[in-house]
Image (cartoon, coloured by chain):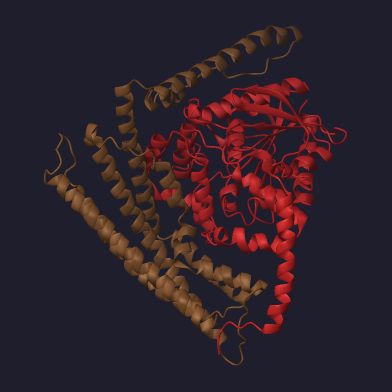
Chain colours: A red, B brown
Amino acid sequence: MTPIGISPTNALSEAAKMGTKVLTGGRLLNAMRDVDVQIATTPKDLVWSQDKVSLFRFRPLAEQLIRVPVLICYGLVGRWTMTDLQEDRSLVRNLLKLGLDLYVVDWGNPSRADRYLTLDDYILGYLDGCVTEIAKRAGVKQVNLLGVCEGGVFATAFAALKPERINTLTLTITPIDFHADMVEERLGHGFINVWTRSISAEDVDRLIDANGNLPGEFMAAIFNQMSPMRSLLKYNLDLLDIADDEQRLMNWLRMEKWIADRPDHPGEAARQWLKDLYQQNKLVRNEWELDGRRVDLGNIRMPVLNVYAKDDHIIPPATSRALGPKVGSSDYTELALAGGHIGVFVGNRSQTLFAPAVASFVAKHDRTAA
Amino acid sequence: MNPLDYTKAFTDFWTAQGDALKKAQEQAGKTLEEGMQALASGAMPKMPGLPTDLSAGVAELTQAGQSIMELWSAATAMCGKLATSLPATAGSLDATVEATFRKIADPRSWLAGTGEMDDVLGRMAEGPRFADLWEVERLYARVLQAWTNLRRRGLEHNAVVLEAWLQAGQSFTARLAGHTGTDTPPLDAKAALALWTETANQQLLEMQRSEPFLQTQAAMIRATTELRLVQQDLVEHVGKQYGFPTRSELDDVHRTVTGLRREVRVMRRQFSSAVAAPQAAARGQAPTPHTARRSNARRKAATT
């Protein structure tokens, strides 16, 4: 007996379904244009810019209930638009509806001309500029920082070096102990950690010297290695599965649009990111230096909310949770969300959990700021 | 077409592909080796500083090529075995699943699917080609040497990947064997694909954490970087000869601009603090502190 069997009746029935699916899907895809696939559509205004960095303020969607503004700080790998992917899956919209005054920093598209920008520049230069501008506009001394992934490391370092400027610190899927992936050793989790440890510091130096920046497509290739079979099925079966469902197809295309937006990581900043943090793990050891000052996590005395994804294969939970014992704050809370790295922002369950938790957290500490 | 004929045609095709690739690889290695021997034996003019170990690099490349050819033959045989398990059904969802299955069970997709890094590295490294061999022999030879090394490292890495796919195939075949008894119904195409996906994914993830995978990938990245650097040396050389602005000159400018921007940021902050201090004092408040100092560390990074 053959191990794989297909009955003629089922085959005919499936053939009919298939024909309809392909026709509908083809019609939908033909009718769509790239301009129809919009992400990050929540209205916002440019309020400050410096070099390639832009600070936007979102227009309110509800009465402002929390006085101290929140600044979303994404990293240089990928773009903040993930937090506002689509109307019904948008951390940005959810926070605005809960009465927050919300800002986001966009790092722009670094080119070879930006290869000498360091993390010092981004954190103590541009991010500092954003915080100053927001505080001035809101008439407050401190702002709430919400860091995401590499941006969470920026926020952490800023909060440690300039604690007097930060009211609360919210971190999302943020690595703190870059070697804590070895705690669990889950298959398919923490490959970036494993990979960076498999190359030498000299390899990193030569890679940056040769390319100037860390190309976005290079990081994308590393990410894709983390789910090897997806790349083989993504554009055939996965796409076919949703081809005749306009809403699901549009959701899929929006995600594709976000994935395709892969800015290059400025070279010197990438050198620090890969060597100081991924390889030498200086942040959790309080050995990392920016602008000649040591980033001491014990200086983080403001309230901290640390959000991580239970099945995050890019930033394994243990790498995020390592912050808890290190901060100087007595008000430290963790929020574990179901799903993976991206699911935190676009997952159905996250829509009802994540934003309310952040809003409640900053609201609780709002009176202490102004 | 009779499903049996189809399967036979399918496996014949793979075998032919494997043979053709093997022959092409052998021919390419032979041609390159002959060229290198001619170069080393003085058939072409020798230049001071010309690398003398090009033939050794070619021998290693050929060896790496032979290893992967052996694996390729095994992969072809394995895929023939997988293909015979799958009957053809035209015009249905199952047929689409089957087609996908066949596609991802094809050894070419095994290397393509996990070879994205290879592709990216290749694109990063493979800059313009230079026909003007006779003016820049030494640099060109270095480029050729680095290219040969990159190809060798690529083959070595692909061999590790191909071996993992073969193990996945063997594991899948063993799991399929559990569905041939009278108590266990045969899988439909979709279930078979799911089983294959799960099996292969597991195997590939294990492979990615293995020392051979990580070591060969690191060697490939190193080789890519080296190729790019020697290509840049060549371009610099040509650029200087013809008075074109070079990459290193542009980098100098960018470094200077980045440094100047830093200084401007510092001065802006100092200015803001200077303005804010009297105003805050008048209100009886302490000004918002701004750290204006720049570090040696940053200056050091800027001059690296």
Position of residue A58 relative to residue A184, above or below, is above
> As drawn, is B205 to the left or to the right of A168?
left
Q: Is residue B296 visible?
A: yes
Position of residue A79 in the picture relative to residue A60 (left or right)? left
Q: Quadrant of residue A313?
A: bottom right
State the residue at coordinates (48%, 37%). A270
Outermost bottom residue: B182
Q: Is residue A144 above or below residue B54?
A: above
The single residue placed furthest to the right in the displayed view is: A63
Which image quadrant for residue A109?
top right
Q: Is residue A335 visible?
A: no
| Quarter residue A64 falls in | top right
Q: Position of residue B158 (x, y in %)?
A: 39, 59
Residue visible at 25% across and 35% down?
B139
Q: Tell me the quadrant of the picture where the N terminus of chain A can be found.
A: bottom right
What residue sits 45% from the left and 56% below the top? B115
Q: Whole-percent x and y of residue B124?
A: 43, 42
| Quadrant the C terminus of chain A occupies | top right
x and y, in percent, of residue A197 in the image: 42, 49
In the image, B128 versus A187, the foreground residue is: B128
Residue lying furthest front:
B1
Residue A212 lies, in percent from the top left, at: 44, 33
Nearest the camera: A345 or B250? B250
